[in-house]
Each structure stands twice: as C-alpha cells, then as structure tokens.
Image (cartoon, helix red, strand yellow):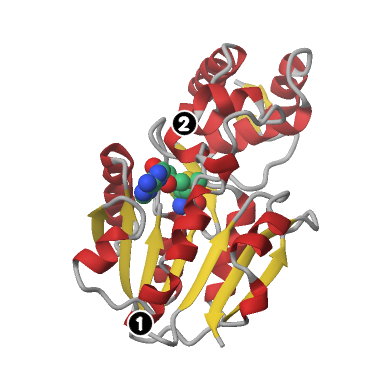
Amino acid sequence: MKIIKEVVEFYSKDFDKKQIKNIIKHVLYKDVFFDDDIVTKNEIKEIRKIFKKLKKGQLLEYITNRKFFYKNNFIVNKNTLIPRPETELLVEEVLQYNLQNKNVFDICCGTGCIGLSIYLENNNINLFMSDISKKALNVTKKNIKLLNAKAKVYKSNFINFIFEKNLKPDFIIINPPYIDKRDKNLDILVKKNEPKTALFAKDNGLFFYKVLYNNLEKLFNLNKDLIILCEFGFEQKQKLEGIFNLKRVKYKIEFKKDYSNLWRYFILKKV
Ligand SMILES: C[S@@+](CC[C@H](N)C(=O)[O-])C[C@H]1O[C@@H](n2cnc3c(N)ncnc32)[C@H](O)[C@@H]1O
C-alpha cells in the first residue's frame, strides 16, 4: 500500500501532476481524494499498467474504456470519438426547450453521449440516434443499455434515414466530423488514436454542413418548427455564414461560443 502523495511523486518525472491525479481518480472511481488517502497494491498495479500504455502514446479514455460526459460515464473504444466537454453545451442548449414527447435526433452519434444525456434528463422524449459506423453503433447500443435508456438506432449516411424512414424530427443535434485532413494543428495523439471517420470531413471539413444546407428545405417541409443544433470547428464560423447564406433570411442561424470563448455551435430555425 502507498499514500496518494507517494504515487504522484513517483510518476511526476514523466507526467504532469494533473494528469497523474486524473488517472488515480479513474482507478479509484473517486471524484475527490486527499494526498494521504491509501492506494492498495492492486490499485497501484492498475495505475502502473495505465502509465505504461500512456507512455506508448495511447489515450487514457481508450485504456480505461470510459469517459465522463455531462452527468454520466460513457463506454468508449477506439471506434468512437472520445466525447469532448465543449459538446456538453449542445446538451445544455437543447435542455432549455420543452422536450416533452418530442422527437430528438442525435446524428453522427458515436458513443451516443449527446442524445443519451438529453434522454436522461427527459425520459419522455423519443430518441433517435444514427451513425455510419457499425462499430460505433455497437458502442451506442452498449451505452443505451448501461444507462437504462430507450432509443431507436439507425446505421445511416448522415441524415438520409430521416427521409428514407419518413421520420419527423423536432430537434436535430449534430456533432459531425469537421476537421480538414490537412490541418497541421491537430493534436498528434488525437490523430494517432481517434477514428479517422469521426474526425475528418471533405471540403476543408465543411462537407456535412453543405449537405445539411442543401437539405434544409426538405427538412423544414417535414416540420416547420424543427430546431437544428450543430457543432463546428472554432475557425469555421465565417465559412459557415457563407454556406448558410444569411442574406436570404429564410432561416435564422445563431452562433454560440464555448467555455474557451471560441465559436463552437449554431442553432438553426425557420424564420
Ligand atoms: C465528431 S464524431 C461525434 C461523436 C459524438 N456525437 C460525440 O459528440 O462525441 C462524428 C461521428 O460521425 C460519424 N460519421 C462519420 N461520417 C458519417 C456519415 N457520413 N454519416 C453518419 N455518421 C458519420 C463517425 O462515425 C463519428 O461517430
């Protein structure tokens, strides 16, 4: 047995203290601990294993197969994006509406973190989740089970299933892939570990926004009161304003910032 302070000091040669404490939290299943708390032999073994894998360039969430998002732990694996804290803003935004009996769609759902977080606050919604990746959808299904939720799951290329299955969405929430393949600023560990289908999009990362724009008429024909929320890359706002061609004033688009004061998502409605 050791006390936490000793464990932190041991690893502080190679890792920063915040990261070490994060790993200890993961292993101990604790949000808060104190320097003189005890770590058992087995827990030390577990912590050592994690550091070995981190040194090889793996990401903590893929080692532990879980990530905390909004209010819950979600299963993740190498076939899903690791949910990001800024995406929680989409959840918070949707939760401001009256969602009773509404059809809520989480498109490009990955782990299902967006849709399931909304459902867990409002289990009277009808939740629909979709992704193109069968392997990602296997994780979505595991999270539905883990969190005791109910949802319909579709393997679909973007929004196609909505039209194919004659569905009528009230809310569509999308965190699509939006990184340009040539982006030089992308974190090397993200590039090495996270699924390419979850990260990259054609047309300088703008592909899915263009498809969405081209289908707006059809979507609002299904439901004129539809509300669409969509995450985007912090440098894409200007380009999105171009794509959604605000001068036509047919749709109202409102851009919002994230915790770091960077443009991060938009809300789109029919005027
Ligand atoms: C940025 S991740 C978002 C995952 C999750 N919603 C989140 O916020 O953590 C994008 C997701 O889109 C999926 N995807 C990529 N191309 C797609 C397509 N053409 N149609 C549907 N989903 C797609 C990927 O498999 C991935 O799960």
Residue at horizontal 67 percent and vertical 64 percent from the top: 241
Q: Nearer the viewer, residue 34 or 29?
A: 29
In this view of the protein, can residue 151 be seen by the observer? no
Q: Secondary structure at mark 1?
A: helix
Q: Secondary structure at mark 2?
A: helix
**Quarter assignment of residue 237:** bottom right
Alpha-carbon neighbours of circle 2 within 10 Å: few (<14), some, or many (≥20)?
A: some
Identify the amino acid type marked 1. Asn
Q: Which residue is mark 1?
A: 221
User: In the shown orientation, is residue 10 left or right of residue 118?
Assistant: right
Q: Which callout, 2 or 1, points at the residue further toward the start of the chain?
A: 2
Q: Is residue 213 above or below residue 82?
A: below
Identify the amino acid type marked 2. Lys
Where is residue 271? Give x, y as percent: 56, 88
Q: Is residue 166 above or below residue 134?
A: below
Q: Quadrant of the N terminus?
A: top right
Q: Which residue is mark 2?
A: 196
Where is residue 156? Give x, y as percent: 27, 52
Q: Is residue 42 above or below residue 200?
A: above
Q: Is residue 223 above or below residue 69?
A: below
Where is residue 8? Give x, y as percent: 73, 24
Mark number, residue 109: none
In this view of the protein, can residue 21 be seen by the observer? yes
Marks 2 and 1, how far apart at CA: 33 Å
Where is residue 124? Give x, y as percent: 33, 81
